[in-house]
Amino acid sequence: MRLLTRASLVFLLFLTLATELFAFDGPKAEFPQTTFQFGKVLRGSVVEHEFLIRNTGDQALTVKGVTMSVPLRLLHMVPTVPPGGEAKLKFALNTNEVGNFYEGMIVVATDDPAQPEFQLTFDGNIISTVEISPMPAFYVASQRGQLKEESLEIINHQPDPLHIESVESSSNRFTLRLVTIEDGQRYRLFLKMNPNAELGKKDELIRIHTTSKEHPIVNVGAHTYVRDHVYTFPPAVEFGRLRLADISDTKIADALTQRLVVYDRDRTDLQVRLSSDLPFLSMISRRATTGDRSEVFVSVDPARIAPGNYSGTIEIITNDARVPKLKVPVSIAVQR
């Protein structure tokens, strides 16, 4: 046993020496930083950044090529980095040529045998001299009868003061209110939903008239969605395109079952009764313990359906007098 142990030690020592003696020599590339985030910059500015590349190998490192997302430009590159040395790759971005958010990718190819390619990122937000924060749009979902209000901020990045002359909208779904936070610099615009607004979704436009020569009119989107007291999510059941064999396969039948939730935020005793004009649908409802919603599981009976395109509805009868009945569209396409 002792001889075997000594032999093992000798063998391990031999392997260690052999590894050191016959180790592969060559270049080795390292990037201390692979991500650059420039935060928020004004549109029209040029963002520049240098990535450092190091060669920790014992042979010269060659940068074989650099590719990048448009409109990034490579301003400076050293093609060869000596052993133990370092170099810089300099890039520039003209923010006039991109949208509000830029996500750039840079790929650097080298002759490092262990890792021939490196990926770098160049990201950030580009804002206008008149910034709408957090974004130039309202997205408001409310319920009939609800007085919901959202707001956004108008920020001036120009050297001259900015004044709001008027805020224009023709919508009857909401009212607007402007509050001055810092005169000439910052304002807050409030959108308050009309509790009697028409049900459904609507995309509208708000026009802000300013004293800015560069931005005399700033457009803000108003995307509103008003639900009834009782509603479903999703608003429709879409099975998509299915094969008849898949519908008949009990192993995947559960995966094809669609889940529909009926909500009534004002009740704790919601009750529903279900029916459909599509005879092949099977529906099971289960009320949540909170009582304000009911889950409906909709599946297809393979024995009662044939190949074809089908559309119909699920009728939901509730115990809420305000919304006693709901109709949910259903669609399915069945192939052989």
Image (cartoon, helix red, strand yellow):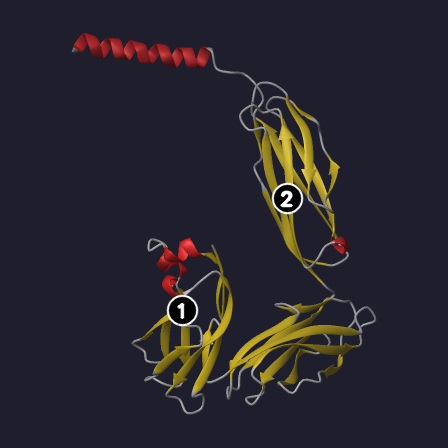
Q: Is mark 2 on a helix, strand or loop?
A: strand
Quadrant into which the N terminus falls: top left
Which-is-in-front pick, marks 2 and 1?
1
Q: Viewed as shown, does residue 305 lie left or right of 101? A: left
- Residue 278 versus residue 265 in the image, above or below: above
Which residue is more in the foreground, 82 or 248?
248
Between discs 2 and 1, the one toward the N terminus: 2
Residue at figure coordinates x 76%, y 67% from the top left: 158
Residue 134: x percent and y percent? Answer: 61, 68
Q: Viewed as shown, does residue 194 lie left or right of 178? A: left
Residue 211 visible in the picture: yes
Marks 2/1: CA distance?
51 Å
Residue 312: x percent and y percent? Answer: 49, 74
Residue at figure coordinates x 37%, y 72% from the top left: 296
Type of residue at label 2?
Answer: Met
Q: Residue furthest bottom?
A: 321
Q: Mark 1 points at which residue?
A: 280
Q: Name the residue under label 2.
A: 105
Residue at figure coordinates x 54%, y 16% from the top left: 25
Q: Which residue lies furthest to the left in this view?
A: 1
